Amino acid sequence: MLASLIPILVALLLGAMSPGPSFVLVTRTAVAQSRRNGLAAAVGMGVGGAFFGTLALLGLTALLTQVAWLNMALRLAGGLYLLYLALRLWQGAGVPLAMPSAMADGVPAGGQVPSLGRAFIVALATQLSNPKTAIAYASIFAALLPAQSQVGEPPRHLLLVLPPLIFLIEAGWYSVVALAFSAGAPRRAYLKAKGGIDRVTGTIMGVLGLRLMADAVRDVASAR
């Protein structure tokens, strides 16, 4: 079983490491809020990844490929959510960030930051904003799962093992990102250029949201 899992885990790790809205969100959360908030966001990404992986293993991704309107609706909703995040970033770009230099375990001493629960929820929603991730997981499983598991239901042990492993991969990678960007140097650089960085981050989020929506419309049009 281990030999068949290694290629799948490598492919999943490479997918998690590819830049996208999740990376942007975790990076900004770690820099602008706190290390703990960044780690909470990483856990949210892990939960979202495990959810999509479970859908792929159960074969529910067929709904997204066969029911065009559902696929488009979910991706349009995800795109709108990313546009909402982009708007919030632009609106807050000019607002000074009250963050004292004294830090304890990556948390500002005396400065207020959003709750860990909020960081988790925003990250989870961002991860779930692109249902195409579930299809990507399904493609990896179809290509790399053992031949006998490609027809019908996958072996039960894979249903039990893969979702927790996906969680560990996603949460582990984004924890590394959160720890790296919550260090002193990135935080000081962010504080010096907050307005510009927030606007650039918001623009990236907006472009990714528009791209997700455009891809959804294009796929539906090409399927007709």
Image (cartoon, rainbow, N blue to C red):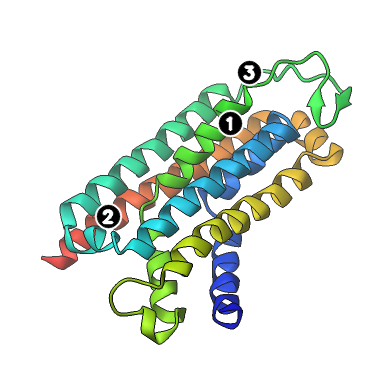
Report how far apart the C-alphas of labels 2 and 3 lie in the structure: 34 Å
In this view, the residue in front, 191 or 5, is 5
Q: Is mark 2 on a helix, strand or loop?
A: helix
Q: In which quarter of the image is residue 217?
A: bottom left
User: Is 147 rendered above or below residue 89?
Assistant: below
Using residue 62 as the reference point, say whether residue 182 is left or right of it.
right
Q: What element carries label 3?
A: loop
Q: Residue pushed farthest left?
A: 224
- Residue at 16% of width from left, 52% of height from top? 69
Q: Is mark 1 on a helix, strand or loop?
A: helix
- The amino acid type found where label 2 is placed reads Ala
Residue at the disc numbered 3: 95
Using residue 173 as the reference point, say whether residue 4 is left or right of it.
left
Residue at the disc numbered 2: 216
Using residue 32 as the reference point, say whether residue 118 is left or right of it.
left
Image quarter (top left, top right, bottom left or bottom right) of the N terminus:
bottom right
Residue 119: image tag:
1
- Which-is-in-front pick, marks 1 and 3? 1
Count residues near mark 1 (Cα–Cα under 10 Å), then give few for <14, some for 14-19, many for 20+: many
Q: Are marks 2 and 1 in contact (CB under 8 Å)?
A: no
User: Is 190 rendered above or below residue 216?
Assistant: above
- Residue at 66% of width from left, 43% of height from top? 27
Dot placed on the residue nearer the N-terminal end, 2 or 1: 1
In this view, the residue in front, 19 or 4, is 4
Using residue 203 as the reference point, say whether residue 23 is left or right of it.
right
Dot placed on the residue nearer the N-terminal end, 1 or 3: 3
- The amino acid type found where label 3 is placed reads Val
Q: Where is residue 35 in the image (x, y as percent from the top left)?
A: 75, 35
Count the numbered circles shown.
Answer: 3
